Each structure stands twice: as C-alpha cells, then as structure tokens.
Amino acid sequence: MRILILGAGATGGYFGGRLLEAGCDVTFLVRPRRAEQLASRGLEIRSELGDANIKPVPTTLESDGSEFDVILLSCKAFDLHSGISAIQPFVTKQTVVIPLLNGMLHINSLTERLGEDKVLGGFCAIAVTLDEQGVVRHLNNNHILRFGEINGQFSTRVTEIEKVFQRASIEVRASKSIVHDMWEKWIMLATLAGVNCLLRGNVGDVLNCPYGEALTLRMLDECCKISDRNGFTARSAFFDRTLKMLTDTNSDLTASMLRDLQNGNRTEADHVLGDLIFRGKEHAVDMPLLQAAYCNLKVYELHRFSRD
C-alpha cells in the first residue's frame, strides 16, 4: 500500500514518521524548503512515547505519475483549498483520501472536488508542534488516528488501511460511526479552543481563576447542544472523558489554536467556531460564550491580517 502525506509538519510529520518507522511505503508531498531540510537532517520526532530519527525521507514536490492508494490530508483548514489542489494530481481510480482536519466543513469541499467515493471521514487526537529546527515535538501521550466510511459501512478498503496503519506505534482504529466521532471531537476542540483563546490560558489556569469552571462548563454545554440539535448527541463515555479532561485543575492542556494566536499565526476560528455557530443558529441554540470567543478571534485577525 502506497501512502502519500500532504506536508511533513507537526501532524503529518508525526503520523507519517511513525508509519515510515514501521516500514510502510510513505512519501511526503512538501515544499522545496522542507524537502531540503528533510534531506539534510532527516525526519526527527521527539516524544515521551519514543524518539525517532528517520533518514532518508521519501519526498516529492509535485506529481511525477506515481500512484498512491491512500492520501493523508493534515493541513490547516484555511489551507484546504490549496491542499486539495496539491493532492488532486495524485488522485487516481484507486486512491482514497483521509482528511484529519477539524470540524466538518472540509468534507463538503473534498467531496465536491474529488468525488464522494474518494473521501473517508477521519480525525486525529494529538498535541504536537514543529519547532524552528524542523523537529516534530509530541506534547502529550495521545497519538490517536480514526477513520471510516462516511456512510457508516465497514468496507474492504477501510479494513485494509487499518491493517497497514496498525503496524505503526500509534493508536489506530477504523470506525463505523466516524461522522459521530468527528462531531464529538469538534465538541471537545471547540470548547477547549474557545475557553483557551477567550481567556488566554491553559485548562489549569482557567480552572484556578474565579468563574473558570463555570465558564468552561457553559461552553461545553453550548457545543453539546449544537451537536445534539444536528443529530449527534454526545455519548456518555465521550462526555465523561471530556468533562474529566476539561475540569483537571492541574492540567496544562491547550488547543493548538491558542498557540497559533500567541505566535501571531492564522487560526482555524472560522472552521472550528464560526461554522459551529452557524449550525447552532440554524437550530436557535443560545450560545453567547461561543460567539464571544469567535468575536475575540476575529478582532485578532482584523488587526493582525487586515493588510494581507
């Protein structure tokens, strides 16, 4: 099975690196600067679950006629349009795309441009970043990858991908309820990112300040109501796990959106919070905290990127 990874940044570099480490046939589609960096230094992963130094690293800058069975799409949501354009020449009759983007908005874009039969649902759960030297730094103990047919069927191609991906030292599972799974991740991420960015602190910072827990629980409730009104009620195991994570007073957990904000980068505000609010408005959900968090990020963008 031939696997193409779009980019070798934080997420793509981590999961692609683990697959390479396990002997899988992986190629990274990268820009020239990253290709040069990987050629000279290799792909470096630093993780409490095991470091990796992989060299050589197969890369390509553009399509050379090679065919791939699976394309792992892990770009930021605001780069989705260019990401689809980059992988489109590699999509052949047997290719399937697994997107690891947040929210649900990207599914429509992918199916419209590539065809419904080419797109699986998917998500990952990991805290990872790329440092200035190009080293992939794993920030927690999660490295979860989920994917499945959007229609809920357990297809042969999904089973085959699962078998190959399970060779790697990551937590991989095919799912018959991938859309529901993606909605639940969206609930968790929107709550975490909304609270982190609105209050400029990690989970523990917020909880150890007046009204922090109440605000966190209210944000979670707003997100759960939106998901419920859209037909995806948060399941008890997910809710209990998420509640425990978001009410840990010793936690230094932050969403990558806060790191993007602190580093002066673009954020996925429109895709994680904006689209969720849009879907909430369609069902008359009261969501003042989500709206405040979204407005806060749009003010930041107004000042930071108004000249772009």
Image (spheres, rainbow, N blue to C red):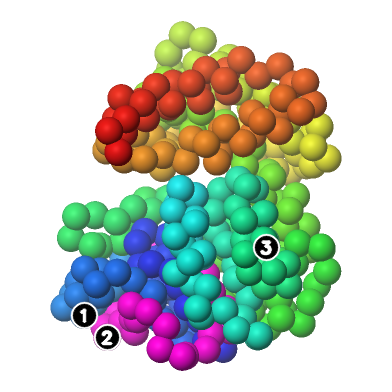
Magenta stretch, overall SS: loop
Residue at the top extreme of this rendering: 210
Q: What range of the chain is rendered magenta?
A: 47-72
Badge 3 or badge 2: first in the primary sequence: 2
Determine the secondary structure under disc 2: loop
Mark 2 and mark 1 in contact? Answer it, CB < 8 Å: yes
Residue 21 in the image: state x and y as whole percent. Answer: 40, 80
Q: What's under tag 1, amino acid-wise?
A: Ala
Circle 3 residue: 111
The quarter of the rendered structure image containing the N terminus is bottom right
Residue 105 relative to residue 125: left or right:
right
In space, the residues marked 2 and 1 are separated at their CA atoms by 7 Å
Q: Residue at x 44, y 53 (%)?
A: 79
Circle 1 residue: 39
The quarter of the rendered structure image containing the C terminus is top left
Determine the secondary structure under disc 1: helix
Circle 2 residue: 56
Q: Residue at x 44, y 60 (%)?
A: 82
Badge 1 or badge 3: first in the primary sequence: 1
Q: What's under tag 2, amino acid-wise?
A: Pro
